[in-house]
Amino acid sequence: MARDFSTVGVVGLGTMGAGIVEVFARNGIDVVAVEISEPALERGRVTLAGSTDRAVAKGKLAAADRDALHERVHFAVGLDALHSVDLVIEAVPEHLDLKQRIFAELDRVCRPETILATNTSSLSVTEISVATSRPNQVIGIHFFNPAPVMKLVEVVRTVVTSPEVVADVEALCARLGKVDVTINDRAGFIANALLFGYLNHAVGMFEAHYATREDIDAAMKLGCGLPMGPLALMDLIGLDTAYEILDTMYRRGGRDRRHAPVPLLKQMVTAGLLGRKSGRGFYTYERPGSPVVVPDEATPLATEAAVADGARAITKVGVVGSGTMATGIIEVFAKAGYEVVSVTRGMEKSAKVCEAVKTSLNKGVVRGKLAEADRDAALGRISWSATLDHLADVDLVVEAVVEELSVKKALFASLDEICKPGVVLATTTSSLPVIDVAMATHRPADVVGLHFFNPAPVMPLVEVVRTIRTSPEATATARAVCATLGKTGVVCGDRSGFIVNALLFPYLNDAVKMLEASYSTADDIDHAMKLGCGYPMGPFELLDVVGLDVSLAIQRELYLELREPGFAPAPLLEHLVTAGYLGRKTRRGFRDHSHR
């Protein structure tokens, strides 16, 4: 039988601590909430009251339940108030010496059978536990912010934590309505170890002026369906907190350069730019603590004005290719009112593409998303061809042929001869250098990357890739076209992976390395990222959907170009691909899909 926790102590009543108090009190457990001084205690009271009042206002908590919840919380200054609780959770700032001092004092104050837990997100639970005479009763219980909402709890056991203590805490998590993943004491645990490498990488991208803060954030929200962009998330977490977590993970986690804090981060912390809590971080906020972003000197001009500046007029578009991507792009342009010339290698392929476009448009009509008249008008704007010569009078060409550099270079050399001057030539490549394609022409200033995401009619993002030879006019034209299509165009340099793949695939690769090290299971890692970070899919779900072979190819490209040791493809990924386990398309990847 799991032990019954009737009274729990919480030390530290910042955002996290107050949230943990609320979780326990909501579930009928008496809480002793402790702070270091009366003013700090009062701030904790206000935080708790604010959270519960918001829940009542939103209809998520009855007023009577809120009042009963507050009845269960006893506020006190000093650790002596915790002498008779069954469990203590410490939620003070991430400083090892501070936590060790608190645990030594808790060891003295609390009953011998009391479990002592830390909510640390990055420090060693083992190092905290040795400050006590009962390390077997010390455990990590890592809640996620905001604790009352987030479902995930990481239960962190050390090499000496008693199995009974682990079982009791797991049962408590279930009672609280949380999903727990139980793991060993390792830097960053699951969620932070995977999340902060990605966040740090995004900061590095911004520091290098590779893309604007708005474009980096929009790319990850729209391209990956994430709840927040990485730089906005850093502002929410707090840049000082993020720096401490990264620095700790770097020192404790084998000095992986992925976790070495980007220099800009330290500079911003030193300058007091801590994110939302200070009113200024990567973005500027209405006031300290406010979530409302206000314009500052780095805010781009209104999109329409910026886009129209220098953009060329586009009325007729050529699309070269016959695959899924080409088909989707033809549909997108035709629906947006452009005349479209579809060019494939032979009329048989043209007929297939035509049929696919019709099928997709008909689905839109059946679902009520498209009027029959609009469908017919879109189809009427498309002409079908099997020769590139029909692109002689178009204003923009979008190439969507196979991802082989030799094929694309030969095509662009032909387009260079056929197309009129001033035409923007765009490639949809997701992994090849755009400059290599551009230099196959005598007009590299007119060549850009237009990386649509699959399925093109649905996905709202397009990466606009400018090379060192691309003219400002060609970039402006590409952005203007994206806006006309109803897409968000994000501008970035010509570097492997652009924004989305460069940030996404190293994170997926890190997850494979974590599995390979037997640190956790694929299920628990997927749970951690979905429930702890709000991701729409866990990394292994996503890898199986994308295809392990595709993922490996992208990861190899990133590694070859950037030579970052942390980007070397995980051996397990290479072995699965070699074995033919490619994900859903072969019914076997990280999971077996044969019965689904």
Image (cartoon, rainbow, N blue to C red):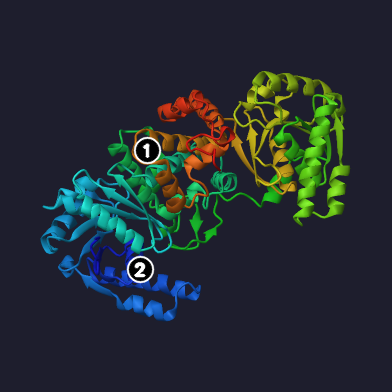
Image x and y of residue 338, in percent: 82, 43
Q: CB under 8 Å between callouts 1 and 2?
A: no
Please report the residue visible at 56 percent of the width from the left and 30 percent of the height from the top: 550
- Please name whichever residue, 152 or 279, is drawn nearer the observer in this view of the structure: 152
Vertical order, 144 against 466 (above or below): below
The answer to whether residue 48 of the structure is visible from this angle is yes
Residue 292 placement, left or right of 265: right
Which sits earlier in the primary sequence, circle 1 or circle 2? 2
Q: CA distance from mark 1 to mark 2?
A: 32 Å
Q: Name the amino acid type tagged 1.
A: His
Which numbered circle lies on residue 259? Answer: 1
Which numbered circle lies on residue 22? Answer: 2
Image x and y of residue 109, in percent: 12, 63
Residue 25 placement, left or right of 466: left
Vertical order, 185 against 343 (above or below): below
On the rendered image, what quadrant is the C terminus found in?
A: top right
Residue 73 placement, left or right of 527: left
Image x and y of residue 211, in percent: 56, 40
Q: Which picture quadrant has residue 345?
A: top right
Q: Name the amino acid type tagged 2.
A: Glu
Q: Which picture quadrant has residue 151?
A: bottom left
Q: Residues within 10 Å of mark 1 (few under 14, many from 20)?
A: many
- Please name whichever residue, 361 or 523, is drawn nearer the observer in this view of the structure: 523
Q: Which picture quadrant has residue 8?
A: bottom left
The answer to whether residue 281 of the structure is visible from this angle is no
Which numbered circle lies on residue 541? Answer: none
